Amino acid sequence: MRVAMFGYQTWGHRTLHALLDSEHEVVLTVTHPTSDHAYERIWSDSVADLAEQHGVPVLLRNRPDDDELLRALKEAAPDIIVANNWRTWLPPEIFDLPPHGTLNIHDSLLPSYAGFSPLIWALINGEKQVGVTAHRMDTDLDTGDILLQRAVPVGPTDTATDLFHRTVDLIGPLVTDSLDLIASGRAVWTPQDRSRSSFFHKRSPRDSRIDWTWPAQDLERFVRAQSDPYPNAFTFHRGQRLRILSAAVSEGRYGGTPGRIFIREGDGVVIVAGAEARSGRLPGLVVKRVRTEDGAEHAATEYFRTMGGYLTDRP
């Protein structure tokens, strides 16, 4: 089949790489210009560079809403569009243009975690598995009929970085398997169960701020969900932002006010956590490594040389 590819960053790069290695012909690539947004500087493999290296025509667009792009797409005459990590809405005159429409590759197990940053949100929420979905694009975001899905389990110590590497490796086989089914006429499309759907917004700095009234188990996942190179979970100590790089749930039970810097345990420092922490029956969060605003990384036992004081959600 003749394929046009819409994509961005490492997800789009993996998709284009799989297409170039397949028996299908890539006739046009559309990608976004480089962005300064914190989350968009992560996993920033260039789709444009890969396309140019293989002689594939490239168009750079923030939004696909101009006559030149539509004209180029009609002239390329693809049988199908494949999209992965395209960051703005594709209008029907584009996604319905090819005979086989548009196949979108989304990094969640739809209908759950439609939208943005699904791996981070899924880990924060304690999901047992994550994955990738190939579905037909329609007028709503990430709601079209599903063709194929691939899943991987979430381990007890997995970070968002671990899950990224595990799921991005699923993209190539998912793309080629999907196109082979479509080209052979064997594709079976399954409508999404909208009663099970969930949609998540783009993350912003505020979404990484720690709320010490959360239970320690939730906070430990919150830290793992924002591992380097993602923006880390943060709190404030003595008016300065402090990023929490690694943490664990305490073995002991600690009572008091959430956010209190309490006592050393093992190789970390216990911070009282949980809205019901005053009962004294909840574990705390053992903070192990932190990063200060100057970029310096510290063992928590060295950074918190004396116990007492509080970590807060504001300066």
Image (cartoon, rainbow, N blue to C red):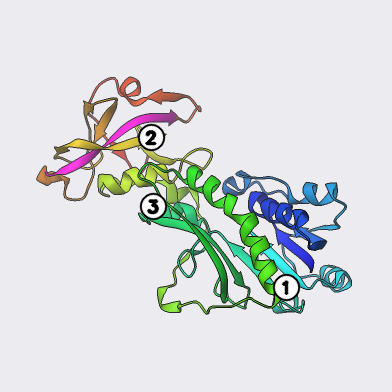
Q: In which quarter of the image is the C terminus?
A: top left
Q: Distance between the residues labelled 1 and 2?
A: 47 Å
Start-end of magenta stretch: 281-291
Give the secondary structure at mark 1: helix
Which x, y percent locates residue 172?
A: 65, 55
Q: How far apart are marks 3 and 2 (CA)?
A: 14 Å
Label 3: few (<14), some (14–19) or many (≥20) C-alpha neighbours in 10 Å: some
Q: Which residue is drawn at 50% across and 27% down?
A: 294
Disc 1: which residue: 183
The disc placed on residue 161 is none
Disc 3: which residue: 124
- Tag 3: residue type? Ile
Q: Which residue is drawn at 15% across and 38% down?
A: 254
Answer with mark 1 or mark 2, whichever residue precedes in sequence.
1
Disc 2: which residue: 246
- Tag 1: residue type? Ala
Answer with mark 3 or mark 1, whichever residue precedes in sequence.
3
Task: Classify residue 135 by image quadrant.
Answer: bottom right
Please give the count of numbered marks on the rendered protein. Answer: 3
